[in-house]
Image (cartoon, grey):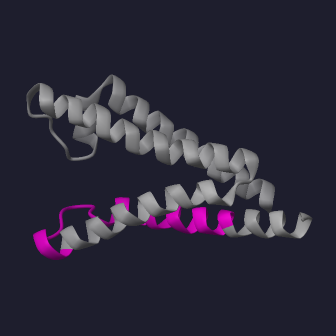
């Protein structure tokens, strides 16, 4: 079971890193996929910098955390995704919803759950081996 979870976490990490690479290399296309548009060079720089950093940090923490069975690193991705989930929920309440509004929230919620399960599993293994 632990190996399956490590593979899932690692693959999600690679997916997040690839999304970040997409923002780095083509922020206009990736922004459109996320409902974002760049307002000139400053907007492009923000999309390229902020979104790349978010996805590389989330993905990198997942990949390295899965590789080394480090639950603490998985908490990084869990916290980032929980913040995004909470902000989306607040936005839905304050601004209203749009077609498919719940889909990214499901992905973020599942990511948080997987990260927390992995963190608990890896921490228990570390404690048992000491």
Up-down relation of residue 116 to residue 52 (above or below): below
User: Is residue 62 in the magenta section?
Assistant: no
Q: Main secondary structure of the magenta part?
A: helix
Q: Nearer the viewer, residue 107 or 89?
A: 89
- Where does the C terminus fall, quadrant-wise? bottom right
Quarter-of-image position of residue 70: bottom right
Q: Residue furthest left?
A: 39
Determine the residue positioned at 26% across, 63% down. 101
Residue 130 visible from this viewpoint: yes
- Where does the N terminus fall, quadrant-wise? bottom right
Q: Residue furthest front?
A: 130
Instruction: Decide if residue 53 is on the left or right side of residue 38.
Output: right
Up-down relation of residue 82 to residue 26 (above or below): below
Q: Position of residue 110 (x, y in %)?
A: 51, 65
Q: Position of residue 27 (x, y in %)?
A: 27, 30
User: Is residue 116 in the magenta section?
Assistant: yes
Determine the residue positioned at 22% across, 36% down. 46
Determine the residue positioned at 13% across, 30% down. 42
Quarter-of-image position of residue 92: bottom left
Up-down relation of residue 70 to residue 106 (above or below): above
Q: Position of residue 15 (x, y in %)?
A: 52, 41
Q: Nearer the viewer, residue 50 or 20?
A: 50
Figure label count: 0
Q: Residue furthest bottom?
A: 93
Determine the residue positioned at 33% across, 32% down. 23
Quarter-of-image position of residue 22: top left
Q: Range of the magenta residues?
A: 93-119
Q: Position of residue 40 (x, y in %)?
A: 9, 28
Residue 107 visible from this viewpoint: no
Q: Nearer the viewer, residue 31 or 78?
A: 78
Q: Nearer the viewer, residue 64 or 33?
A: 64
Instruction: Decide if residue 113 is on the left or right side of residue 40.
Output: right
């Amino acid at each position: 079971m632990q190996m399956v979870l490590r593979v899932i976490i690692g693959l999600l990490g690679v997916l997040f890193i690839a999304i970040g690479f997409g923002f780095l290399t083509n922020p206009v296309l990736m922004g459109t996929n996320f409902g974002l548009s760049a307002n000139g060079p400053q907007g492009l720089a923000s999309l390229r910098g902020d979104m790349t950093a978010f996805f590389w940090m989330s993905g990198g923490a997942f990949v390295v955390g899965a590789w080394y069975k480090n639950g603490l690193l998985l908490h990084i991705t869990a916290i980032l995704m929980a913040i995004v989930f909470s902000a989306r929920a607040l936005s839905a309440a304050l601004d209203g919803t749009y077609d498919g509004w719940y889909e990214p929230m499901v992905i973020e919620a599942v990511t948080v759950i997987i990260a927390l399960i992995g963190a608990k599993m890896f921490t228990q293994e570390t404690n048992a081996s000491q």
